Amino acid sequence: MKKISSQFAGNYVAFVNEEIIASGKTTLEVYKKAKQLYPQKMVSLMYVPTKREVC
């Protein structure tokens, strides 16, 4: 999880089968990218907070 936090901090990420498939600044942007790549799969979205947001 540490790698995800540092690499994607401040962004939304999309997962399919526990694999990150897209990232970006807004949920809509990330969802559209993910559905283009995997139109038939269920996509999960998550926001990765920055260190400042966690403290």
Image: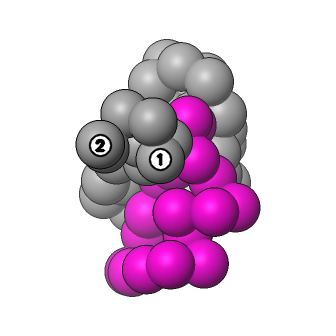
SS of the residue under disc 2: loop
State the residue position of label 1.
51
State the residue position of label 2.
55
Spot occupied by residue 20 in the image (x, y as percentages of width and height): 56, 68
Spot occupied by residue 35 in the image (x, y as percentages of width and height): 54, 43
How are the residues colored? one colour
Residue 15 within the segment the image draws in magenta: yes
Whether residue 11 is visible here, answered yes or no, is yes
Within-10-Å neighbours for mark 2: few <14, some 14–19, many 20+? few
In the image, residue 42 above or below residue 24: below
Quarter that holds the C terminus: top left
Residue at 63%, 53% (x, y): give it. Answer: 8
Residue at 43%, 69% (x, y): give it. Answer: 16
- The amino acid type of the residue labelled 1 equals Lys
- The amino acid type of the residue labelled 2 equals Cys
SS of the residue under disc 1: helix
Spot occupied by residue 28 in the image (x, y as percentages of width and height): 49, 18
User: In the image, which residues are magenta?
Assistant: 1-18
Number of numbered discs on residues:
2
